Amino acid sequence: MNSAKGDLDFELYPGLAFRGKWNRKPYKLIRKLGAGVTGYVYLAEGETGSVALKIGTEPMSITAEANVLKQFSKVQGKPLGPCLFDVDDFLSTNSVLPFYAMEYIEGENFVDFLRGKGPEWLPVLALQLLSALSALHQQGWIFGDLKPENVIVTRRSAEVRLLDVGGTTRVGRAIKEYTEYYDRGYWEQGTRKAEPTYDLFAAAMMVVDCAYPRQVKKERGNTASQLKKLVYQAPLLKPYREIVYKALMGGYGSAEAMKNDFLASVKQTEERSRVKRKRHKVRKQKGAPIDLILVMSFVLILFVLYLLIQSF
């Protein structure tokens, strides 16, 4: 794939304009957005506005990814990932490069968004992510390469969307692509078999990421103990630490089960806050007469002192 990537580097550059070989839709490359195992993603200008182009060298891989995006669009409710617009070939000087055009989603990745907005956003984003994973799993797919860079929070509506479907794998097969830090195999907590628990481990690691300014290096020895320490010593994770650790240990059979526990924890936290606010309000109300007595006593003392001064 290194030589293929070299070919792409040579063939593609900002400013390049071309038409698809079959559908004849025009595109102009603006800048590179990222790279994956199967090719590069470019921001491009299409006939109706900005799009993201995934361009590779392997037709089978590009077609497979495009088919996954089609599956995403069939899921009821909000879209899980970018909308697919076009699938075609780019006939360059030296070769034919397959590509697909998809919706360009503006926003920030999962962790960067939360660090910028504050801890109150953690349950909001986590519940959205688990809803998206639940819908995906019900369609028979495992996302695979789940990491902050592949989960974007839209700028306008703060919706969680999944990006880069290159690692998406049918349930039961071997995971095609992964990133070590979010891979349970790297942390010695399971295999790389495509199943819901694989995605939920990565989702939990993303939540852990939000609690620290930078990624923590894996230590030698008992990785389960290290993961537990990471979860339980983070103040941000206190309301959800049992849920996050359970996901890291493979304790959830479905994203829906983890989502339900997260939702219950959010409701419990809100109820505790409501009771605390109510108690504080009662204390203030009870304290009002005492405060009034103190003020009146102070005024009385001042009045007595005034009379004494006037008598001299």
Image: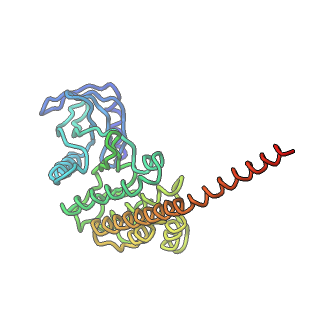
Residue at the outermost left position: 22
Q: Identify the image's colour scheme: rainbow, by chain, secondary structure or one colour.
A: rainbow
In the picture shown, does residue 171 fall above or below 17? below
In the picture shown, does residue 14 fall above or below 83? above
- Quarter assignment of residue 271: bottom left
Question: Front-most of 180 and 284?
Answer: 284
Residue 131 placed where, x, y %?
A: 27, 58
Left or right of 239 in this view: 60: left
Left or right of 210 in this view: 89: left
Question: Front-most of 65 and 232?
Answer: 232
Q: Is residue 22 visible?
A: yes
Residue at the outermost right position: 312
Residue 176 placed where, x, y %?
A: 30, 59
Q: Is residue 195 visible?
A: no
Q: How many marks?
A: 0
- Quarter assignment of residue 168: bottom left
The residue lying at 42 percent from left, 64 percent from top is 269
Left or right of 277 in this view: 67: left
Question: Front-most of 92 and 213?
Answer: 213
In the picture shown, does residue 91 fall above or below 201? above
Residue 209 placed where, x, y %?
A: 47, 57
The residue lying at 20 percent from left, 47 percent from top is 66
The residue lying at 57 percent from left, 59 percent from top is 289
Question: Front-most of 61 and 223?
Answer: 223
Residue 28 placed where, x, y %?
A: 27, 27
Quadrant (top left, top right, bottom left, bottom right) of the C terminus = top right
The residue lying at 41 percent from left, 52 percent from top is 121
